Image (cartoon, helix red, strand yellow):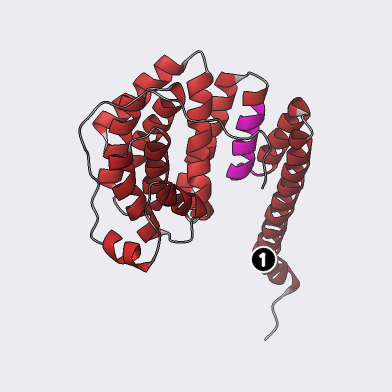
């Protein structure tokens, strides 16, 4: 039995609106990615102000585009606009941790935290930011807070505080490959082999394909191989005693990729 014309039109409206909504979202995501690609090209040419404009356009088109927030943050950092850069990186991290796509992208999660640590360490509001992060770390059991603190302190050359924060992060999440990798490589870079070897062994057991971890182990006289993977299953973070030299880690390269 066919519907009267008026009732048929009313029945079709929700379907048409749903189609338009889905199509509109797809278009917005496409425009956002196009703007992001343009921004990356501009950034790599050194046109940081133009790149920031492109990334701003990308997030206007798609507020869930955490990659463009991240790139906006590093472009603003290059321009010396540290507070705006911090805000962009915080937004990137918030979107990563609250969207399905972001939750399935752990590599970018820690790229975002590394970038946030970099700009905080360079900014004139670093003490206020550090106090806020330390307060969060004390009042909630979030290992990312300790990891962020570790990266900031490492960049500032405060090895003792960096060690303490890395240890806390690795203790809360001993199977987090990013924590183990970054902590182990940092320990090795400042000559703390007693800390570095067990942490790098753990990182290798979690990700035996990581070249940086394997290279760090070889520099410490440890040959990577299947035996380390088996041993790493039972490894626990070690906290040896002794002074730690305050040696800053080198900065990251200025080019970016999507």
Magenta residues, start to end: 62-76
Query: Can residue 101 be found in the magenta stretch?
Result: no
In depth, the one of 211 and 48 nearer the eye is 211
Residue at 39 percent across and 39 percent down: it is 188
Residue 121: x %, y % from top left = 48, 22
Left or right side of 90 for 194:
left
Furthest toward the left, the residue is 241
Left or right side of 93 for 38:
right
Residue 85: x %, y % from top left = 58, 26
Residue at 75 percent across and 38 percent down: it is 39
The residue tagged 1 is 15
Reply above or below: 97 against 76.
below
User: Dividing the picture into quarters, in which one does residue 36 lie?
Assistant: top right
Furthest toward the bottom, the residue is 1
Residue at 68 percent across and 21 percent down: it is 79
Residue 236: x %, y % from top left = 23, 51
């Amino acid at each position: 039995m066919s519907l009267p014309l008026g009732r048929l039109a009313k029945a079709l409206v929700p379907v048409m609106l749903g189609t338009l909504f889905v199509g509109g979202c797809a278009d917005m995501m496409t425009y956002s990615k196009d703007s992001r690609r343009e921004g990356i090209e501009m950034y790599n040419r050194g046109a940081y102000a133009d790149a920031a404009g492109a990334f701003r356009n990308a997030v206007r088109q798609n507020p869930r585009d955490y990659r463009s927030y991240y790139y906006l943050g590093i472009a603003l950092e290059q321009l010396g606009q540290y507070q705006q850069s911090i805000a962009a990186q915080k937004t990137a991290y918030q979107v990563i941790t609250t969207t399905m796509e972001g939750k399935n992208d752990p590599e970018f999660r820690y790229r975002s935290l590394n970038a946030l640590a970099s700009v905080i360490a360079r900014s004139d509001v670093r003490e206020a930011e550090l106090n806020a992060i330390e307060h969060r770390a004390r009042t909630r059991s979030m290992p990312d807070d300790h990891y962020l603190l570790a990266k900031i302190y490492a960049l500032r050359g405060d090895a003792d505080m960096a060690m303490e924060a890395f240890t806390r992060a690795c203790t809360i999440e001993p199977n987090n490959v990013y924590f183990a990798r970054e902590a182990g490589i940092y320990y090795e870079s400042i000559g703390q082999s007693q800390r570095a070897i067990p942490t790098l062994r753990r990182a290798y057991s979690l990700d035996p394909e990581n070249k940086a971890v394997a290279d760090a182990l070889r520099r410490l006289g440890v040959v990577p191989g299947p035996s380390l993977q088996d041993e790493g299953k039972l490894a626990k973070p070690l906290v040896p005693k002794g002074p730690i030299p305050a040696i800053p880690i080198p900065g990251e390269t200025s080019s970016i990729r999507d």
